[in-house]
Each structure stands twice: as structure tokens, then as C-alpha cells.
Image (cartoon, rainbow, N blue to C red):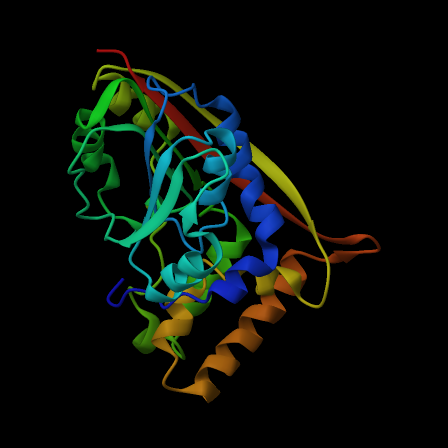
Amino acid sequence: MTTPPAWDPAQYLRHAGHRARPFTDLLARIPDPPTGRPRVADLGCGPGNVTALLAGRWPTAHITGYDNSPAMLDRAHVEHDGPTAGGGRLDFSHADVRTWTPEEPYDLIVSNATLQWVPGHADRFADWTAALNPGGTLAFQVPDNTDAPLHTLMRDLAATPRWRARLAGVLRRPDSVHTPGAYLDRLARLGCATDVWQTTYLHVLTGEDPVLDWVKGTGLRPALTALADDPGARDAFLTEYRDLLRTAYPRAPYGTVLPFRRLFAVARKTG
């Protein structure tokens, strides 16, 4: 991608329930930190809604959410910043996950649906696990569906003669997420007891063109950012993409089903 995507917290949170579910599933598999008042980092915290779930699990923790989107951080500060009910603290700070290096020991470093935006993210695992206290954990989940129509149709449309000049190299690459085995091998070689798995969710979405509405909050952001200075072109691209999605994800009487595969990893530092 040539320009970082501009994020819209309100659009992202329109499907907050569906988007948070993988994080709760990840959270259920993370072992308790080794200290009574854990230090926790959430990389790519977005608007902070799932960061707050960490405080529910570990009420005494000092949790810092990191993100590079001013709009997302503003929303997180307003809605979630401050002391927690259990005596811990929840705060947020600007950082780029591509270069973020821990400046203190952590008991948990977690990331929810962020690393797919970070080229070379697996190369950062060594620095992150080195900063974990013994018994600490690195845990993340990422969308693992670049082969789904949601993404293939977007990329194919962007590569057509009408759009390639504006959108070439803009969208997330098909290889932005590694295989489960690659993550397991990388983390295990760093001395971590590692659990990696995949889950496919069948999200039942409602409303008019709900799959388009979903992807406008995430995968489509780079294209929307690239076309932001030309509203006519942006709307034309959205119309073409919407029509393709309507065929790929037909509406049923009870809603529109969006199959969505995700990849999870929990790596506990054993040394």
C-alpha cells in the first residue's frame, strides 16, 4: 500500500458484535499472566472496544492500547480511557505496529485483526517475545480469507482498466497472512509453547448490502482512501463492487451469510 488507509471508527463499529467475537474466543485461550497486576499491550487497538474486554478479564491490569489512527485513538480515549473497576488502568497511545518496540517488560502482548496490515509482522515476533516476562504470552488473531470473494472480487475490480491506474498496489496483498504452520514454526522456535488454529464464522448480516457495509469498515479502506479526492469515482467503484458482492453473497430470508475464516495464535514464553 502506498498511503496508510484512513479509518472511520463509526463505520468499523457498525458490526462491532461480529468483529469482537473472534477476540473473545482468543481471550478464552490466553493463560493468566504470571503477575498479579499484569502489564498488557494491545497492538492495533482501534476504537478500544475490545481492549476494554481485557480489563474485564484482568481487572487489576495496566493495559495500553496502541494504534496509529488518530480517529480511532480519539474514540478510544473518549469511551474507554481511565481507571478500571478492579483497580487497574486502561490507556491509549499512538504507535506504529511496524516499528513498535517494547520499552518495558509485558505479561501479555495481544493483537486483534491488525497484523494483516503489517508487512513483515512475523519478523517482529522475536522483539515482542523477548520483552515478555517468563510465563508471558503473545496472542493474536487475523482474518485469513484473502481467497474469499470478499477480497478476490475487490482485487479483480481494482485491476480492471478503469481502476488500475488509481488502485494498483493499494489493496492488501493475498500473502499478507502466513499459513498456520508458518506461525507455529516461527513462534515455537522462539521458545514458546504455541497453539495455532483456524475458525470459520458464518456471520448472518442484515440490512441493505450488508457485506459491502462490513468491508467499508476494514478491507476496503485503502481503496476508499485512494479515491477520497474524487467522490464520483469512489461512488462508481462502490457501485461496481456492490453488484459483484450481491451475486457472491445472495440474500436469504433471514439475512446475508458472510463466511469469514480467521487464524489464531497463542504463544506462551516458557523460558
Residue lying at 37% horizontally and 59% vertically, measured from the top left: 73
Outermost residue toward the right in this view: 253
Q: Nearer the viewer, residue 50 or 220?
A: 50
Residue for point 31% across, 27% down:
182
- Count of labels in the image: 0
Residue 175: x %, y % from top left: 33, 45
Q: Position of residue 4 (x, y in %)?
A: 29, 64
- Residue at image position (40%, 36%) is 88
Q: Quadrant of the N terminus?
A: bottom left
Q: For the C terminus, give its image quadrant.
A: top left
Q: Picture coordinates of residue 36 (x, y %)?
A: 37, 20
Decide if residue 216 is in sight here.
no
Left or right, 78 with respect to 132, comes to: right
Q: Is residue 103 visible?
A: yes
The quadrant holding residue 249 is bottom right
| Residue 133 location (% of width, % of height) | 23, 21
Q: Residue at x 72, y 64 (%)?
A: 207
- Quarter of the figure with residue 24: top right
Task: Name the image quarter holding residue 47.
Answer: bottom left
Residue in the foreground of this view, choosing between 79 and 84 = 84
